[in-house]
Image (cartoon, grey):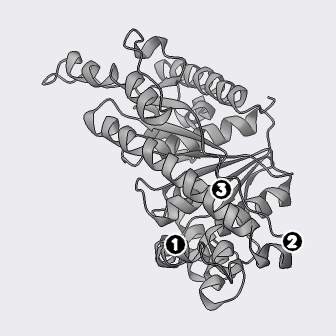
Amino acid sequence: MTTPVLTFFNNKGGVGKTSLIYHLAWMFANLHKQVVIADLDPQANLTAAFLDDERIDALWNNQATGSTLYRCVEPLADVSDITEPILQKITQNLHLLPGDVALSSFEDNLSTEWPRSMDDNNLHRPMRILTAFWQLMQIAANQVQADIILVDIGPNLGAINRSVLLGTDYVVIPLGADLFSLQGLSNLGPTLRRWRNQWKKRQDNWCDSKDSKKYSDFQLPGGRMEPVGYLCQQYSVRLDRPVQAYDRWVQRIPDTYREAILDAAPDTSIRQADDPYCLAIIKHYRSLIPMAQEHRKPIFSLTSADGAIGGHANAVSDAKKDFRLLAQKIAGKINLPV
């Protein structure tokens, strides 16, 4: 039995993805779910949200095997095997697989092994490398009996993200209210379908190989990548730009999502506010973000002692309701009891 993997991804950056995962991880933990967070973005911003600089510096510089995701896969470059991860305990229900800026150097290994995974012989090593992230996440989940794994990845369509998505059961797509997010959405759907089909060929090739019998206990991820829905940032109104400029792009999202992600016919009658695939409109909570970052906690956990008084206190209460509803909605779509 494997733990479901939920990845948040758009190949357009700047859509609030890392902050979203951070807050949902805390909310799932508050809902009594055992959560593992895997930071597979080489920028490691999610790790920086959970850990202070001194703790990250110690993880990156002591080079202990298993201390970060990169240190876990690093032995594969020397014809060795992955190292069991050392999880960072955030709370009783929340554990982090720390990211590492050095992870980007592993991209070449993944690119090299991708075509080799379609060879006739010696398939175990390329398949081991291509599924290393999924193997690590499942080992980590088993350590704490996790109910769900939440994953952050970078905004690109490179080999690292392909490898992560091969091990992903569900995908949530964060979006902004702009042309670039819309274009990112258009690119993402065909890419996911192509990777899904390519992985199916590799699974079949593995099943027909001698290695599959030799390594009969070696598991492969399903490459499911099932779209759960999208989230859209609430656009801010600027004096030099009317609301219509944002609304123009926002109202194109439902059709683009159906065409690009679901490979289905568009439905021009649906506006974003009524779209069942729109999981939520994420508010900015601008005044709370710096306060939450200073105290290293989610915005919905801020108290009067942290400075959340008056209007801030009301915003904290609203944020708690919003993220609770969002976590429950996502849980319902992936069959996770909360």
Tell me whether circle 3 and circle 1 mark residues in contact (CB < 8 Å). no
Q: Is residue 49 visible?
A: no
The type of residue carrying mark 2 is Ser
Q: Is residue 264 visible?
A: yes
**Disc 1: CA contacts within 10 A as few (<14), some (14-19) or many (>=20):** many
Task: Give the residue number, with chain letter if any, for mark 1.
Answer: 103
Which disc, if any, is residue 216? 2
Identify the residue at horizontal 57%, vertical 65% (top origin). Answer: 99
Give the camera-side residue of 273 and 234.
273
- N-term-proximal mark, 3 vs 1: 1
Identify the residue at horizontal 56%, vertical 19% (top origin). Answer: 318
- N-term-proximal mark, 3 vs 2: 3
The type of residue carrying mark 3 is Gly
**x then y, percent, for residue 118:** 59, 72
**Disc 3: CA contacts within 10 A as few (<14), some (14-19) or many (>=20):** many
Which disc, if any, is residue 167? 3
**x then y, percent, for residue 14:** 36, 45
CA separation, marks 3 and 1? 17 Å
Hey, which residue is sitting farthest left in the picture? 240
The type of residue carrying mark 1 is Leu
> Height in image: 79 above or below 157?
below
